[in-house]
Image (spheres, grey):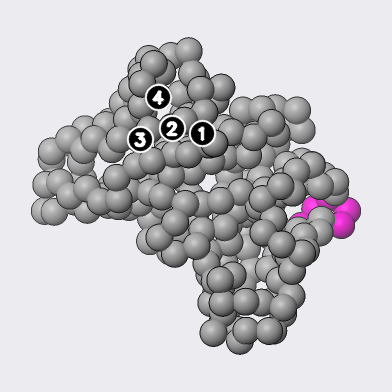
Amino acid sequence: EAGVTQFPSHSVIEKGQTVTLRCDPISGHDNLYWYRRVMGKEIKFLLHFVKESKQDESGMPNNRFLAERTGGTYSTLKVQPAELEDSGVYFCASSRFRDSYTDTQYFGPGTRLTVL
Amino acid sequence: GEDVEQSLFLSVREGDSSVINCTYTDSSSTYLYWYKQEPGAGLQLLTYIFSNMDMKQDQRLTVLLNKKDKHLSLRIADTQTGDSAIYFCAESGGSQGNLIFGKGTKLSVKP
């Protein structure tokens, strides 16, 4: 079984540009989560999809961030326009069961975003 | 508010035991987790413990939970150089299972 994959692994952009991150969850996993780790700080929750629906987006920092999961498969996270404070590592995770509070979240390797 | 605290660094010698500590604030957390991140890799779930348990053992790993003090620890017996990584403590804080993480403890194992 393939794990969670993320693309790109690294992205370096200038302030004001747009970047789109992609996450492919494990096949068959309904739940998809985005998290972010800013340098030296905690890994923070951004949002949660159940299939194609946004279940919880309380962690999204502002309206420059837009997440989609069309068709309930892969997800994209777009940052437009990017600011310096958006730099960090963006992790995606997926888990299998829709209603399972405790189902294991499997994480991808992350995308390291650097905004100059 | 929800907050998970852990020390940032730990250095041990190969063969010794490592103990990584964590405190959390949300007493309603049902599960508490330990994740491991090796350089360049994603987060790997090491183990988890249900909140009504005091201890869980899995091979070289022992998790202790003191629910009264909201204190969680991870003990790694016979620490090896391959155990060098960042270890994250996490609690299940959200209503839909989103995780709340600490800043991570960087474990360095010296030969």
Q: For marks 1 and 4, give the CA distance.
A: 11 Å
Which residues make up the magenta segment? A70-74
Give the mark, 1 or 4, whose residue is nearer the N terminus: 4
- For mark 1, name the chain: B
Three-letter amino acid code of the residue under disc 1: Glu
Give the mark, 4 or 3, whose residue is nearer the N terminus: 3
Residue B70 is labelled as 4
Three-letter amino acid code of the residue under disc 4: Lys
Please say whether residue B35 is visible from this viewpoint. Answer: no
Quarter of the rendering occupied by the N terminus of chain B: top right
Q: How many numbered marks have been drawn onto this rendered protein structure?
A: 4
Viewer-nearest residue: A70 or A53: A53
Q: Would you name the residue on which mark 3 appears? A: B22
The lab-note entry on whether marks 2 and 1 share a chain reads yes
Give the mark, 2 or 1, whose residue is nearer the N terminus: 2
**CB within 8 Å, label 4 to label 2:** yes
Give the mark, 1 or 3, whose residue is nearer the N terminus: 3
The percent position of residue B4, horizontal first and vertical second, equals 44, 39
Q: For marks 4 and 2, give the CA distance.
A: 6 Å
**CB within 8 Å, label 2 to label 1:** yes
